[in-house]
Image: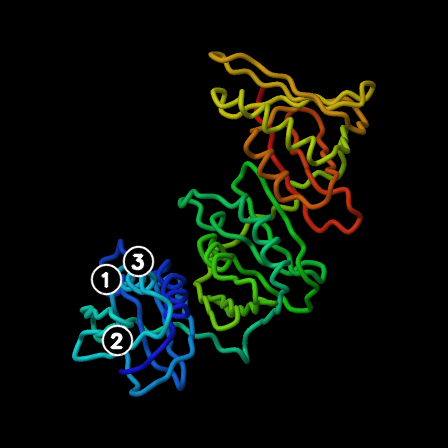
Amino acid sequence: MELTVTQENLARALTAVGRVASTKTQLPILSNILLRTDGNRLLVAATNLEIATTQYIGAKITKPGAITIPARLVADFISSLPKGSVDLKVVGDNLHIKSDKYNSIINGVIADDFPELPTINESSSIQYSIKTDDFKQAVSQTIITASNDSTRPVLTGVYWHSFEGQLILAATDGYRLSERRLVATTSEVSAIIPTQTLQEVLRTITDDGDEVDVLFDETQVRFRINDAEIISRLIDGNFPDYRQLVPKKSETTIMISKSDFIRVSKIAGLFARESGGSVTLTADEDKKSLSIHSIASQLGENTSEASADVKGDGQVTLNSRYLTEALSVIDGDTVKFSFSGKLAPCILQSTDKETNYYHIIMPLKS
């Protein structure tokens, strides 16, 4: 293999795919990046057997070929070079790199030992093209409520499914739940995508990409953003029937400025660190206010209050971090916050008529 590429393109591709290369593995080859010519392009790829990511970059190919090289070393080295052209040449099992006054030889491993990259049959798959901004927002709004508990694998991903003509994303960790309607669909979809995969897709999205192409088959999902591809295994199992947890009506409803709600929540959270983040919210219909009280036994206590449109008095205790995280991903300037008593689920959503997202938090026992 012999070719020339630009330092900027190669550094960007190596950094992107290098995040997937695994250092904690019994297969040393998985800590390497695959470089392989493909027509007049260079394929840069890595896999940890759960996720495979590839990037194509333009190259001046003198001689086709392939090699794998240590991911971290080559990514750090190429990103340290000055901008300009970089010459790559494979001699035996070594990669010779030349750029301006810099010359380096990196010991590699023949590409034959690298796992075969997964593929998806496009003709028999379900495909969506989603606007980049909508994709980023929907994933960000749901990924925060996915679980980290590996003993319940189905909760460690985001559930993409069709329901009533809509493609819907949902995630829950047992303490909170989020649901986002994304696009209309006529296809039947039911897939749990690992959180790590979606985080990798978010990191891969660039400003010049208008759409994210998403492709599902029975066991895999593929995301394509410009010249980048990420293919991941789906999580096997059935997602819980979460809709039965969604309150049909509420005894207390508060309409409040989102910025005010965020401010009083953050301040209350400062005093709640010692008590596991526990804050008590009190809605007062006569005073038209929502107050949040928190106590730190060693430091003191705090009560923060904000004006609100309140229907029905009520009090509930929540985890302050869950509350601020929910508020950070809700659209619009005004939030609707509803609950019934101290033990029923609380629901937060935008007051916008076109809102397509809701967030549920389970109360703490006060």
Q: CA distance from mark 3 to mark 1?
A: 9 Å
Q: Nearer the viewer, mark 2 or mark 1?
A: 2
Mark 1 is on which residue type? Answer: Leu
N-terminal of the two: label 2 or label 1? Answer: 1
Mark 2 is on which residue type? Answer: Ile
Q: Is residue 97 left or right of residue 345?
A: left
Q: Nearer the viewer, mark 3 or mark 1?
A: 3
Q: CA distance from mark 2 to mark 1?
A: 16 Å
Q: Nearer the viewer, residue 104 or 206?
A: 104
Question: How many C-alpha atoms fall within 10 Å of the one at disc 2: few (<14), some, or many (≥20)?
Answer: many
Q: Nearer the viewer, residue 287 or 182?
A: 287
N-terminal of the two: label 3 or label 2? Answer: 3
Task: Determine which residue is flagged by label 2.
Answer: 67
x then y, percent, for residue 67: 26, 75
Task: Determine which residue is flagged by label 1.
Answer: 27
Task: Determine which residue is flagged by label 3.
Answer: 22
258 is higher (above) or lower (below) than 184 = above
Question: How many C-alpha atoms fall within 10 Å of the one at disc 1: few (<14), some, or many (≥20)?
Answer: few
What SS does tag 3 mark? loop
Name the residue located 54 percent from the left edge and 49 percent from the top edge: 143
Q: CA distance from mark 3 to mark 2?
A: 17 Å
Displayed quadrant of residue 112? bottom left
225 is higher (above) or lower (below) than 332 = below
What SS does tag 2 mark? strand
Mark number for residue 309? none
x then y, percent, for residue 49: 34, 63
